[in-house]
């Protein structure tokens, strides 16, 4: 049984669109169920200013992808890297046990997108974080 939040994010996913002018993108697929996700990010002042996704998968994959983007938008890159599968599951008021693995899709694709961005802009990223 899915929570109301899962159904809401499945029926009306947030940030579900392609972003051709993204600063970076990251993908992740789960071979156990065939789900595949790509997350796109735009970064401004070391924060995720815009985020979107395209996913091929079940209702839980769509809902977790949507919630991952909601949780990450507006966060610094370091804050977004700390988002966990448990954070996504908690924000959705839980997932059925056989769908918990879907939370890995969003978190892994988000981390891949951020790491791709950092690798592409390594010098400017290190300079912006040197004042920590």
Image (cartoon, helix red, strand yellow):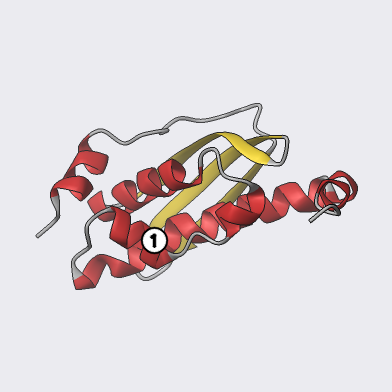
Q: Residues within 10 Å of mark 1 (few under 14, many from 20)?
A: some
* Picture layout, residue 26 above or below residue 54: below
Give how far across and how far down residue 83 sits, in percent. 49, 59
Q: Residue furthest left?
A: 1
Along the line of sight, which residue is nearer the eye, 28 or 131? 131
* Picture layout, residue 94 above or below residue 32: above
Q: Is residue 34 visible?
A: no
Q: Residue furthest front?
A: 132
User: Helix, strand or loop at disc 1?
Assistant: helix
Which image quadrant for residue 17?
top left
Number of numbered discs visible in the structure rendering: 1
- Rendered residue at 22%/63% (across/down): 95
- Rendered residue at 38%/57% (across/down): 35
Give how far across and how far down residue 130 sits, in percent. 86, 54
Left or right side of 8 for 78: right
Q: Is residue 94 visible?
A: yes
């Amino acid at each position: 049984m899915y929570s109301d939040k899962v159904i809401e994010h499945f029926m009306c996913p947030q940030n579900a669109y392609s972003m051709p002018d993204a600063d970076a993108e990251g993908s992740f697929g789960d071979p156990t169920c065939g789900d595949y996700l790509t997350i796109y990010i735009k970064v401004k002042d070391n924060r995720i200013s815009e985020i979107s996704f395209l996913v091929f998968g079940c209702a839980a994959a769509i809902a977790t992808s949507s919630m991952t983007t909601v949780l990450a938008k507006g966060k610094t890159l370091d804050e977004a890297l700390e988002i966990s599968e448990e954070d996504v599951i908690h924000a959705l008021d839980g997932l059925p046990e056989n769908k918990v693995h879907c939370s890995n899709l969003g978190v892994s694709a988000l981390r891949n997108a951020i790491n791709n961005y950092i690798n592409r802009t390594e010098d400017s990223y290190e300079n912006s974080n040197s004042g920590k």
